[in-house]
Structure formats: structure tokens, C-alpha cells
Image (cartoon, helix red, strand yellow):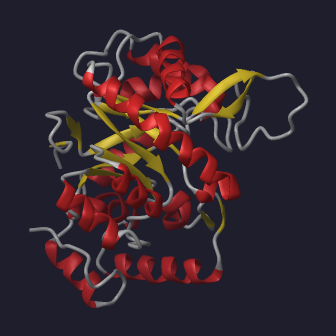
Amino acid sequence: MAIGKRQIGKTGLAVTELSLGTATVAGIFLEVPDDQARTTVAAGVEAGLTFVDTAPQYGLGRAEHLVGDALRDRRQGVVLSTKVGRLLRPYKGSEVNRDAWIKPFPFTIHYDYSYDGIMRSVEDSKQRLGLSEIDILLVHDIGPVTHGEKNAFYWRQLVDGGYRALLELKATGECKAIGLGVNEWEVCMSALELGDWDVFLLAGRYTMLEQTSLDPFLTTCLARNASVIAAAPFNGGALMGTGKWNYGAAPAHIIKRVGDLEAFCKARNVPIGAAALQFALTHPAVVSVLTGPRSPAELQSTLAWWNVQIPKSFWTELKAAGLVDAHTPLPA
């Protein structure tokens, strides 16, 4: 099917319904050569995926560097998002936590959600990208899943100054939309208590496998005119039968649910990859589904799944079978 566009809240900014994430091309878990990464991003844009998301964390600067290379001569018409909350400092060789990045840049992470930290983060990102404009700024991975007991300290930084910095950056035209990029919907509810946001990039919490964010999060987004980008539609590979889920090994109940969904799709001759990719767009709050192909070949597989015509009866029967939440919206 055609790659349509949907508007983010009241911003007037429109993003493609299928979009390109860049953690994978930065070398998470598997090495991706630089030329392959640049070619993948360029191929995605040329195929019509003109919303690209990146972050300082991805490859510890590698993703922004490579995304900038790929977009520099094709920036027009592309919506670009990056994230704030992590500053990169030179790697001294003593820290042992390099996360899951293969051949990251020689930096280490310093969390900072303060006013000055966010202002610094934006300027640093522009220099790594080699681009002068960023369209969307997302507060990255704030919440107890990432920070544990330290989250109260970082949340206070956001409340006391970080949120004000984002409002100023939007008001002065340094960006067009602000939001959060997280794996937990609960912290988005806390953010909505703090103020107004244009968009939330939520990874893995609204997929064909998991609909935990339906209420109150997605219902509140509709009421507040805040848009949602549904990232990680395959739940970290779980829906592709990898046995992985949420960056780790899938527990038994997840493996069983995946098996049930696989059998359901197979019985109806619908590739589970296509169903997983198209599922989130059935919700009116969702404006885009974010995927992360590692290569032009993986990108072509994604586009093939996108173009599978799934009959409405598939979604109706999926709900009737109890394989998704009873409150899951169906396509009109």
C-alpha cells in the first residue's frame, strides 16, 4: 500500500506512516559497516520513508554521524527526529559498560535532563549530524526502567528546567515538535501531567503482541491531541520468532503468545511480519510505525510486508479470537 502521511498533533508537521529508525544501522548487537548504514538510510528515504529517527545513544554518536551523511544531500522533505537527555563525553577506557553497541564511537554517556543539558545536547547533535535543523526533539529513556532509583533525580531535572528548554526551542523555531522517546508508557502519563507534548515515540508497548498502553495512555493522547509513533513493531524480534523480547530472552508466556499469533496468521495466509507491521496504524492516535532495517535487503522485506493487503476480516477475527485486547480499535 502507499506510504501515506499523518499530522503530528497541532504542529502542522506530517510524518510518513512507515518510518526509519537507526539504532540498528549504528550496530546494536550486530556490526553494520558504515557504507551499508548510509546506503540503508538513503534507500529508505528514496523509497518514501521520509521520517527518520536517531539519537546520540545509538552507537554513542555513530548513528547521528551516519544519518547526517546520508541525509545531507537529500534533506529537503525529510522529517528528522533526535533525542535529548544523554550527553556524550570522551571514553577514557576505564568504563566497562558499552551496552550492546558493536564498534561504538569513543564516547560514554552522561545523563542530563536539565535546561543546560538539553540545550547542549541539541547543539552537539547538530554538529554530529552536520545538519543545521532538527524537526522533532524527544526526551530519551527517562523513567524508572532506565534509571531505577535515580529516576526521581532526573525527573526533577526535567521538571525544573528541561521541559522549559524544550518549550523555548520549539517557540524559537529550533524544532517543530517535542515529546518523549521511551519504552514505558507510564512515564508518558507523568509527562502529560507536567505539560503539553506533541508526540510520544513508544517502543514495544503497542504492538500485535502487546497492547498494555491502550488505556489510559492512548486514550489520553487522543483527548490531548498528542500523537504516538509506534516503534519496535516486532517487539525486539519476538514476533519474528527470534526468542528475543525487550532486549533479552523472551519468557515462556511471550513465546506461547507468539506461537498462537503465528498459527493465526498462517491459517489466513497473512505473513506475521506484515500483520505486525500494519497493526499499530489501526489506532487513531498512532501516526507512524518505526522500523529499523540493517540493510537495503531488510528494507525491501519491510516494504514487501507493508504492501501486503490484509482484509478487514483478519483484524476482526484476531480480536474475536482473544489474541489482542478487546478494546483494540479496528480499521474503519
Outermost residue toward the front in this view: 160
In the picture provided, is 12 more to the left or to the right than 100? left
Q: Is residue 293 visible?
A: no
From the top left corner, tell me how far across and down residue 283 is, in percent: 22, 64
Q: Report how many numbered discs are placed on residues in the image.
A: 0
Q: Residue at x 18, y 45 (%)?
A: 9
In the picture provided, is 254 more to the left or to the right than 308? right
Q: Residue at x 54, y 15 (%)?
A: 128
Outermost residue toward the right in this view: 94
Residue 26 found in image quarter: top right
Q: State whether residue 173 is above or below residue 211.
A: above
Q: Is residue 189 visible?
A: yes
Q: Residue at x 45, y 33 (%)?
A: 296
From the top left corner, tell me how far across and down residue 294 is, in percent: 52, 38
Q: State whether residue 253 is above or below residue 22.
A: below
Q: State whether residue 75 is above or below residue 156.
A: above
Outermost residue toward the left in this view: 332
> Considering depth in this image, is 239 or 149 the residue closer to the camera?
149
From the top left corner, tell me how far across and down residue 197 is, in percent: 30, 45
> Considering depth in this image, is 84 or 4 the residue closer to the camera?
84
Residue 89 found in image quarter: top right
Q: Residue at x 41, y 73 (%)?
A: 212
Quadrant placement of the C terminus: bottom left
